Image (tube, grey):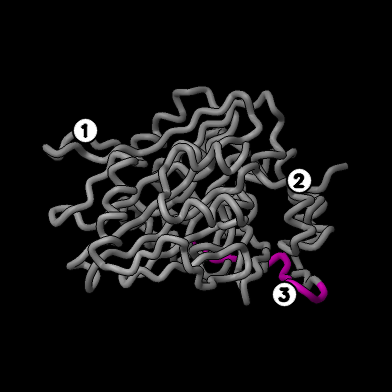
Amino acid sequence: MSRNMTTDELDLGPLRDIVLTMPVTDIAVTCDGRVWIDCGEGMSEWNPRIPLDDPRVVRAYAVNLCSQLGRRLDEACPIADASTTGGIRVHAVIAPVVPFGASISIRFPSLQAPRLEYLGALGMFPGVWGRMLASLVKRRATILITGGTGVGKTTLLRSLLDECPGEERIVSVEEIRELGEIRSCNHVSLVTREPNVEGEGAIGLPELVKATLRMRPDRVVLGECRGEEIADLLRALNSGHHGGMVTVHADSVQRLPARLIALGMLAGMSPKALAMLVEGAFDVVLHIVRHAGRRHIAQIGHLEVNDAGVLHGGMLATWDGEGKIVQGRGWNSFEKRWSEA
């Protein structure tokens, strides 16, 4: 797929040139019309051929982008989040939520799911972990990917999905469509729907997660777990659906239990009930960080419940992105279980 084919879904106007000439992953437009781009090494300012030097122009540009994607952006709805079917994501906020004009964030997916070997060559993980990651997919481990915004969770998720056998039926659920095309020919992509102007017709993540179980999936994939859908997800992963993949925002394996408990509370789950379901749901946690523009898997861990019934994150191995791997005491048994024979 060419970048032309991807951007044909969205008229980017004055920002189209930079997208066609550089491998842009993110574009941010500030309220005063300054444009910042990220080509994988952090943000830098870029001067478009047609400047966005008037707050009214920035606001009109934001409204136009969102209207192309069927989203309102006006005084009644000053925040909009939308995506194209190809995975270009647009987030816009207009005044008075921002001081003036509009703030715009545009995220572009990789044109093709990068292979694990490519991510390894970029330094996302050491070579020996590459073989382990491929083996986890092949042996149908259920994988939880964690990290902050923009660290590469979706990129890694797409690469892992690309390792799945082509005949497997994959059902993915997303709030905003970001996964794009994956190699499986039997892929169903479900996305949430906003309510109409009367406030009706909304379809949320919990409903979609429930729907996946009626669609005969080989793997259930949740682009990002961020609320009460965690209850339906955990029920699905504890009912024989192995090999699923999920991402969630968290800042370390050790602090992940607190994040999951907070999500569980949104679904009315007690910490003890959530702990029991989580322990049986995920086989491995992959935590990604970004430092000085570089993204890498910093921790491989797992979730377990101690004798007091408290959920905690255990460390299997860590990597600083440059030096040696530090293996925890559970690594040998983990490797023995999940490595290919």
In space, the residues marked 1 and 3 are separated at their CA atoms by 47 Å
Residue 196: give x, y in percent of width and height: 19, 37
Above or below for 322 versus 337: below
- Residue sitting at 43 percent across and 64 percent down? 28
Q: Nearer the viewer, residue 222 or 278?
A: 222
Mark 1 sits on what residue?
201
Above or below for 3 versus 335: above
Disc number for residue 134: 2
N-terminal-most mark, 1 or 3: 1
327 relative to 295 in the view: left or right: right
Element type at mark 1? loop
N-terminal-most mark, 3 or 2: 2
Residue 322: give x, y in percent of width and height: 78, 74
Q: Label 2 sits on what residue type?
A: Ala
N-terminal-most mark, 1 or 2: 2
Q: Are marks 3 and 2 in contact (CB under 8 Å)?
A: no
Q: Are marks 1 and 3 in contact (CB under 8 Å)?
A: no
Q: Are marks 1 and 2 in contact (CB under 8 Å)?
A: no
Number of numbered labels in the structure image: 3
Disc number for residue 320: 3
In space, the residues marked 3 and 2 are separated at their CA atoms by 21 Å
Pointer 1 local density, CA inside 10 Å: few below 14, some 14–19, many at least 20: few
Q: Quadrant of the N terminus?
A: top right
Which span of residues is magenta-colored? 306-324
326 relative to 253 in the view: left or right: right
Q: Label 3 sits on what residue type?
A: Asp
Element type at mark 3? loop
Q: Quadrant of the C terminus?
A: top right
Q: Label 1 sits on what residue type?
A: Gly
In space, the residues marked 1 and 2 are separated at their CA atoms by 40 Å
Q: Nearer the viewer, residue 261 or 37?
A: 37
